[in-house]
Amino acid sequence: MSKQGITSRDESFSDWYNDLVKRAELAENSPVRGSMVIRPNGYAIWELMQRALDDMFKATGHVNAYFPLLIPMSFFAREAEHVEGFAKESAIVTHHRLAQTKDGLGVDPDAKLEEPYVIRPSSETIIWHTYKNWIQSYRDLPILINQWANVMRWELRPRLFLRTTEFLWQEGHTAHATFEDAEHEALTILNECYARFAEEWMAVPVLKGVKSKNETFAGADHTYTIEALVQDKRAIQAGTSHHLGQNFAKAFDVTFTNKEGKLEHVFATSWGVSTRLIGTLIMMHSDDKGLVVPPRLAPIQVVFLPMGRDEDIRKLTYAKSDELATLMRGHGVRVKVDKRDQLSPGFKFNDWELKGACIRVEIGPRDLEGGTCVVARRDVGEKVTVAFDQLADYIHAQLDAMQHDLYARALAFREANTFRVDTWEEFEACFAGEGGGGFVVAHWDGTDETEAIIAEKTKATIRAIPMTPLHPDDVKPGKCVLTGRPSTQRVVFAKAY
C-alpha cells in the first residue's frame, strides 16, 4: 500500500481503484444501495466534461431540453424489445403518499396510483410520446434534442462511477425524415463528439465500431460504440450512438407528411455518455500515488505551495503565490494556492499527487531571493527551477505536453495489448489467468450462438466490429476462431466492465 493509503495496482487493481476513488475524495457510497455521493472533487471533473460535450452538441446543431423522471408503465409496453431490455433493471413507483401505521411510517394503502410509474432507465418512451405532438410535416424535422439528467437502473454489482443504480448522463434523442439522415446523425455524434472528446479531452484512444446484435441497444436497428482499453487490459464502453430506425416512431405512431404529401413514420437516433467516463479516466491514467487527470479536464491544473517556517516569510511567499496565481488565472489556467499552515510541505505534496493537480509550484524563501520557483509535473515528477517571469509560458507548454503525453502513453499501451489470433488455443491463452486480457482481434462466424459460447468459455465479449480495420488484413475472409466456419472479417473481443 502506498503512503497515500492506496493498494498498488499490481496487488489488486480492483482495490486500487476503490481506494483511489475514496482517498482522492471523488465519490463514496451512500445509504441508498448502489447509489453514490459524488464529492466536489469528482463533480468538478463531471462539470468540465459536461461543458466540453455540451459545446460540441450545440456546435452540431443540438439544443437542450428536459423530460420527466417518471414514465407511465404503459409507455414501456409499446416497444417490446426496449421493455425487455430494461425490465429487470427498472424501479417502479406505485404509491404517492406515506402514512403513520401501527409499525411507524409506511406506505399509505389508500394512495395507490392508478398506473405505476417507471423511474427512467432511459427516456425514449416518454420523449417519443412527446414528439408525436410536435411532428406533423417534414418542415418540423429534424428534431435535435439533448437532455442532461439522472437515470436509474437497478444494479446488482455496483461499483463507484462504473456501475451505479443511479447515475448522471446526457441522452440525445433526434427525429429525422429519412434513414440516411438518421444514419448521418448517429455517425456525427460518434465521430465529431464522442470519439473526439475521448481522445482530445480525456486523452483516451478509442476503438470505433458497430455492436454485434447481442450487444445492440434494446430497440435499436444498430448501435455504434467507442471502446477504451484501460490498465488492467479490460475494455470500457465509453459511449454509444444508436440508430433506432422507425421502431419507436411506429410504437408511438409518430408520423409526418413528406414533400410528396405522403404519410411516413420518422427515423430516430439516441445516444449517451455518463459519469462512467470518470471511471474510465481514472483507470486509464492514474497510478499508485493517486489520481492523474489530463489538463483539459483537471479541476486544479496548477497548485501553488508557498512555504516558510517564519510567519513573516510565509506572508511574503503567500503574496508571491497569490500574484502568480492571479497571473495564471488571467491566462485561463485553473489555479489553487494551498495556504494550510498546519500541514507540512511533504503532506501537501502527497495530498496534491493523490488528488491529481497537474502541476505543483513550490515557493520558499530561497526562491524569493532568486526570483525563481520549483515546478513539478504530476505525470513526470521531475523538479525544474523556473524564473518567475517565465512561469506562465512554461506552465502552458507543460500542460500541453502532459495532455499529449498521456494520450501517447495510453495509445502505446493499447497497441502493445492488441493481439491477432487465428486458433482457439491462442484465443484462450490471451484471456487466461488474472493478468490476461487486451483487445483480441479474431474471426467470428457471425452467429449469436458462437458469440455466447465464446463469452461463456472466456468471459470475453465482442466489443466492436471495427468501422475502420485496425490492420488491412482484418477485412479479409477467414475462419471463425471457435467453429472454423467462414468469417467475413475480424472483430474485437475483450473482457469488459
Image: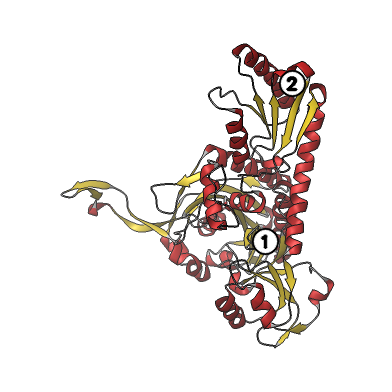
Q: Nearer the viewer, residue 89 or 293?
A: 293
The reply to whether residue 207 is in sight is yes
Type of amino acid under label 1: Glu
Residue 127: percent from left, percent from top:
54, 55
Type of amino acid under label 2: Asp
Q: Is residue 97 above or below residue 472?
A: above
Q: Which residue is mark 1?
A: 227
Element carrying mark 2 = helix
101 to the left or right of 112:
left
Q: Is residue 294 above or below residue 88?
A: above
Image quarter in which the C terminus is found: bottom right
Q: Residues within 10 Å of mark 2 (few under 14, many from 20)?
A: some
Q: Residues within 10 Å of mark 1 (few under 14, many from 20)?
A: many
Q: Nearer the viewer, residue 8 or 417?
A: 8
Which color mode does the image show? Answer: secondary structure
Tell me which label, 2 or 1, sits earlier in the chain. 1
- Distance Cα–Cα, label 2 vs label 1: 46 Å
Element carrying mark 1 = strand
Q: Nearer the viewer, residue 487 or 90?
A: 487
Based on the displayed image, in which of its 4 quarters is residue 313 positioned? top right
Residue 477: percent from left, percent from top:
79, 82
Residue 352: percent from left, percent from top:
61, 36
